[in-house]
Image: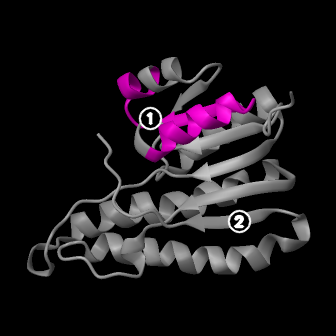
Amino acid sequence: MTKKLDGKVAVITGGTSGIGLATARRFASEGARVVLTGRRQAELDAAVAAVPGAVGVRVDSSSLAGLDELFARVKQEHGRIDVLFANAGGGSMLPLGQITEEHYADIFDRNVKGVLFTVQKALPLLSRGASVIVTGSTAATTGTPAFSVYGASKAALRSFVRSWILDVKELGIRINLLSPGPTRTP
């Protein structure tokens, strides 16, 4: 029986735990050739071991040079991307009176800058009919105490995706934003 992703190349940023790792396992079970990214080598190695046939690339998605290296490797080894899951990101809780410039920059670098440039730098490799999935959050539309910076970063992604859909429609690329609620991750 043919699997849904047989022979497809799937790149998953933030693939070492939680939603990213679960998605990588599922994509691999459906026949995809999976490329995972993560910032920490030990976690990346463990994720690669847990996903049959996966390849791991250590990269911080907020680093443009790192993204260039990632996509150069994907181009060399696979020549294209059929599914891009821009999942890397994260956040921590601080109430309004305690938010620092560093807190703001860290969250926006990971969640906004990282996703923007992940998708942009992947564009030349995205095949016609490719799918781009961006991890948003219900925090983008629902207020949460001490989570305002994170929620704002995910709201930015909602706005990006609404415009990117129009930017890439002539290329035959689909872009969707998933907005999961609270998810237990390590």
- State the residue at coordinates (43%, 62%): 111
Determine whether, in the image, residue 46 is placed left or right of residue 32: left
Q: Is residue 119 above or below residue 30?
A: below
Determine whether, in the image, residue 181 is placed left or right of residue 65: left
Q: Residue 172 at what x, y percent from top left?
A: 88, 64
Q: Residue 180 at what x, y percent from top left?
A: 45, 62
Q: In this view, does 166 lie above or below 17?
A: below
Q: Which numbered dot is residue 16?
A: 1
Q: Which numbered dot is residue 150?
A: none
What amino acid is labelled 2 in the image?
A: Ile
Q: Please say which color scheme the image uses.
A: one colour
- Which residue position is annotated with label 2? 175
- State the residue at coordinates (18%, 73%): 146
* Front one among 70 and 97: 97
Determine whether, in the image, residue 48 is placed left or right of residue 75: left
Q: Residue furthest front?
A: 1
| Magenta-colored span | 19-45
Identify the image quadrant of the N terminus.
top right
> How far separated are the C-alphas under marks 1 and 2?
22 Å
Disc 1 is placed on an element classified as loop
- State the residue at coordinates (23%, 64%): 102
Q: Which of marks 1 and 2 is nearer the N terminus?
A: 1
In magenta segment, residue 26: yes
Q: Total label count?
A: 2
Identify the image quadrant of the C terminus.
top left
What amino acid is labelled 1 in the image?
A: Thr
* Front one among 50 and 126: 50
* Front one among 123 and 92: 92
Q: Residue 90 at what x, y percent from top left?
A: 35, 55
- State the residue at coordinates (68%, 60%): 120
